[in-house]
Amino acid sequence: MTEAFAGIPKIHYEGPESKNPLAFKHYNPVEEVDGKTMAEHLRFSVAYWHAFRNGCADPFGGPTRLMPWDDGSDSVENAQNRARAAFEFFEKLGVGFYCFHDRDVAPEGATLAESNANLDAVVKVLKEEQERTGIKLLWGTACLFANPRFMHGASTSPNADVFAFSAAQVAKAMEVTHELGGLGYVFWGGREGYKSLLNTDLGRELDHMARFMRMAVDYKKQIGFTGQFYIEPKPKEPTKHQYDFDSATCHGFLTANGLDGDFKLNIEANHATLAGHTFQHELEFAASVGLLGSVDANRGDPQLGWDTDQFPTDIYDTTAAMLTILKNGGFTTGGLNFDAHVARESFEPVDLFYAHIGGMDAFARGLKAASAIRADGLIDDFVTQRYASWDASIGADIEAGNVGFAELSQYMLDKGDSDPNISGRVEYLENILNEYI
Ligand code: XUL
Ligand code: CO
């Protein structure tokens, strides 16, 4: 096959002084930070659906992107060529991972059997390309939202046959993820939610979703797939309300249904902001309940307010995210998957490189800043000090469960009033953070 990205060389690290737009200024894969290389810390992944299937159409106009390797047809051969072009891109960019939905990589057929056969034919090429390059599948997933059959949902559809179809599709997507040595499998319930409560039995739908997840866990064991399961929270879009609203909602759903040992969360920056949270809030909450698994790295647009899936460029945000990720020991099975697309007006193949290079450099800077902030220790020490009253006397007794309201009433009656508060020093801490950015 001829080169898909002809004229674009392999991207190298050239350092902060470089003016070469096709070079990393901050991401040096072999540079060590806190005992691990940057490549090991950041585990960058390309999202197949945005990089190779999203032509950047919007509700007001058609696709703009030039993809000269793609003949525009729905043939399996075109899908196989596209897969080869994708691996050329991954290799030139120097990422270790990619992610896909079943229907991104292979065309849907007229029947499930046909779709499965198409998928197998493309998975064969993906496997060859993985072996040729050493690039790994971070996670696979199934597209349970594009086909009109999912108009009412997948596992939460009022139509039991749609639940059954979804189960069959996920079973197959898990099988191919397993075959490709995928490190994980993501459940993003794009249409698991509702448009109107007037036509919705919310409680029944949530029970069905839990039943579906339980079946997936059982099937995982049946086929011997040992990758990590993730739920990807998102509050809305395409539905008015999505059941996997945010980390806290997912945690509640998983624990209520005895599934928390089987799943972690895949936190997406733009989904966090859609839920009215910061990216770091979602990461912190997930980490606090032991569910921080992987990240869909992107950003929204504060003026637009929907899921714009832009490439992450805000170093303040990447630093905050890396602070939480480092504090929690870094990724194990997860990584930073760029669930992001180029702007509609950035339509040339080279723009895909600029976009990913920028995202990778932004996270490299975040990693370096976060590591330096942690080494300096001022912020961590402040937090430890702020909670010092819990380390001894009455605080320690409360944490240990040794006292109740009666004892605390007596304690306060004897003491008369609480000890004075100390300042939260918000601006002082913000100033420290800025020193490192
Ligand atoms: C949609 C989204 C998905 C998931 C995978 O907002 O983020 O692409 O990451 O289904
Ligand atoms: Co995502």
Image (cartoon, helix red, strand yellow):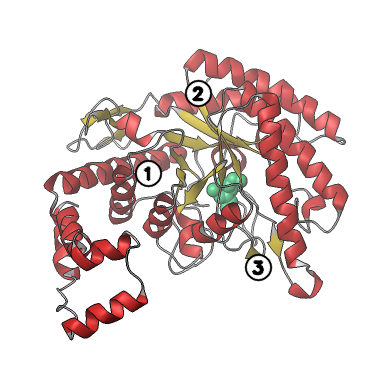
Position of 334 relative to 290 (above/below): above
Q: Is residue 233 visible?
A: yes
**Residue denoted by label 1:** 359
User: Marks 1 and 3, how far apart in space?
Assistant: 30 Å
Which tag, 3 or 2, sits closer to the chain's start?
A: 2
User: Marks 3 and 2, how far apart in space?
Assistant: 38 Å
Other residues around mark 2 within 10 Å, as few (<14) / some (14–19) / many (≥20):
some
134 displayed left or right of 139? left
**Residue denoted by label 2:** 88
User: Marks 2 and 1, how far apart in space?
Assistant: 19 Å
Position of 313 relative to 277 (above/below): above
Pair 3/2: label in front: 3
Which tag, 2 or 1, sits closer to the chain's start?
A: 2
Which numbered disc covers residue 115? none
Which numbered disc covers residue 240? 3
User: Residue 175: horizontal and vertical position, in percent?
Assistant: 69, 27
Q: Amino acid at mark 1?
A: Gly
Pair 1/3: label in front: 3
User: Residue 209: horizontal and vertical position, in percent?
Assistant: 71, 53
User: Residue 91: horizontal and vertical position, in percent?
Assistant: 45, 23
For the point 12% across and 47% down, which residue is it? Answer: 376
